Amino acid sequence: MFDIKNGNPREYGYRMPAEWEKRKRTFMQWPTRDGRFSKTPIWPDGVKEAKKGYAQVAKAIAEFEEVVMIAPAELLQEVKDMCGEKVQVLCLPIDDSWVRDNGPTFLLDGNQDIAAVKWRFNSYGEKYQTHYNDSKIPYHLAVIYDLPIFKSPLSLEGGGIHSDGQGTILTTESAILTDSRNSKFSKEEVTKLLKQYLGGEQVIWLKSGLYGDLTDGHIDNTACFVEPGVIVIQACYDKNDPDYKIFQENLKILKEFKDRASGLPFEIVEIEKPPIRYYKDQLLTLSYINYLPVTGGVIVPVFGGDAQETDRKALEVIQKLYPDRRVVAVDGMPIIVGGGCVHCITQQMPYGKSI
């Protein structure tokens, strides 16, 4: 039942499940930052194309599992019209549309009961205003779905963490150890807090995420767990690309760690990055790692144009990594111009007996 819990989740036996574990639903937030409902627009061509992109992703996920789109009252009918009957709509005030980052991180305990973590969300180190309504979404969802919630002292976004469900957390220094987020904590203190609030035993710190990432380098653009002992990473083979050095450094770090469950080195699978692309002089952080596993499927962003060959290779690799799931490609361009992609605009709730 809803309760703001004292202590930390690990004390209660909670852990952050892996994304391949059984799921109940996926949450999304409808694009709103167009000047009418927020002071700071984020979409360079307005929000119309972004809404088409979000609707495409919502419809794709809805073919596999329940989708709940959060939207303000003024836009409920628009969501219904654009997303169709399979997508549920939840009326709540929001500022922006990146529920992965401002929403709760859901946890499971040994009895398959669900809880939620609310991080201190300050819109990527106060990059955007406002973020008051977005920061309240974890509380709203905990009340609506009758979940206990833990309030973390850490400032981070959900796209900045990834879990194998067995005690290993993957993250980046560039997106968490920033003065605008967690200046009062040392790296050692942040590591301890991540273990406490995610039920982890091991934290793998990559130095940074992709070059130019507006989030300061979220892990969900960089690398993620595929299954126990397997990590997929976006690779860069062009020495003139600023991501080349980042890739080499992160690869070296990953090779130094072992899977806790097996004690063996991680199997690391590389997916070649798309060609460098700009939009209105803005470097776009194109990433195939920003995909979303769903019940029986995987929703993967592709980018077309000069990326057609890397699109094809990425889809082939992901299909091999998830042989029992249907891989669905969606156009990532309408979303990526806002700074993120499929994984960034979604947040999964695991299946639990309490829901």
Image (cartoon, helix red, strand yellow):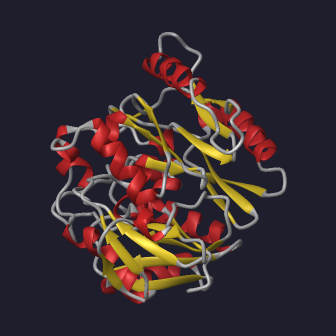
Residue 93 horizontal side relative to residue 271, left or right = left
Residue drawn at point x = 51 percent, y = 49 percent: 162
Q: Is residue 312 above or below residue 220?
A: above
Residue drawn at point x = 64 percent, y = 74 percent: 62
Which corner quadrant of the image does residue 292 belong to?
bottom right
Q: In this view, does 338 lie above or below 275?
A: below
Residue 333 horizontal side relative to residue 283, left or right = right
Counting from the top left corner in percent of width and height, residue 8 is at 35, 65
Camera-nearest residue between 55 and 193: 193
Query: Where, quadrant-wise, is the N terminus in this rendering?
Result: bottom left
Residue 17 horizontal side relative to residue 338, left or right = right
Does the rendering let one see residue 189? yes
Camera-nearest residue between 253 and 99: 253
Counting from the top left corner in percent of width and height, residue 111 is at 60, 77
Which corner quadrant of the image does residue 255 belong to?
top right
Camera-nearest residue between 82 and 104: 104
Residue drawn at point x = 33 percent, y = 40 percent: 175
Camera-nearest residue between 78 and 319: 319
Residue 77 horizontal side relative to residue 26, left or right = left
Query: Where, quadrant-wise, is the C terminus in this rendering?
Result: bottom right
Q: Is residue 250 above or below residue 94?
A: above
Does the rendering let one see residue 214? no
Extreme-top residue of the structure: 239
Counting from the top left corner in percent of width and height, residue 48 is at 40, 63
Counting from the top left corner in percent of width and height, residue 300 is at 64, 50
So how many labels did they put on this image?
Answer: 0
